[in-house]
Image (cartoon, rainbow, N blue to C red):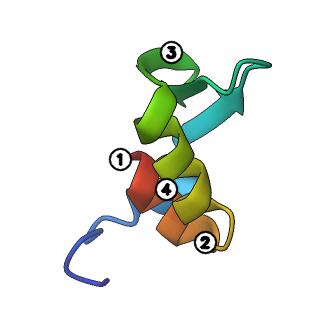
Amino acid sequence: MGEIDKRNKLHENPFTFEVSKDKKVFIYWHGKQVTILKDKDSNRFLERIKNADQKEAQLIMA
């Protein structure tokens, strides 16, 4: 992973996400909403993110 994040920006945790009641996933970058995932995309995202460590989670959201 060293080649992916050469400047170590992912250590700052710029990405966050929230899950709504209807299973939509809202992804934020520095507090600004950048995308919404729903249906198959949100299910796939939640499956991938549940066992990811912090840096891997940042890469998934990126």
Q: Which amino acid does label 1 sit on?
A: Ala
Q: Is mark 2 on a helix, strand or loop?
A: loop
Rendered location of residue 13, percent (x, y): 57, 50
Q: In this view, does 42 lie to the left or right of 35?
A: right
Residue with the mark numbered 3: 32
Tell me, for residue 52, which label it has, or none: 2
Mark pair 3, 4: CA separation: 15 Å
Q: Do the residues labelled 1 and 4 touch (CB within 8 Å)?
A: yes
Q: In this view, does 1 lie to the left or right of 12?
A: left
Look at the image and tell me whether residue 29 can be seen: no
Q: Which of marks 3 and 4 is nearer the N terminus?
A: 3
Badge 4: residue crowd in 10 Å (few <14, some 14–19, many ≥20): some
Q: Residue furthest left?
A: 3
Vertical position of residue 5 compared to residue 35: above or below = below
Nearer to the camera, 24 or 5: 24
Q: Hey, which quadrant is residue 16 in on the image?
A: top right
Residue with the mark numbered 4: 58
Mark pair 2, 3: CA separation: 22 Å
Residue drawn at x 29%, y 84% as measured from the top left: 2
Q: Residue furthest bottom?
A: 2
Q: Are marks 2 and 1 in contact (CB under 8 Å)?
A: no
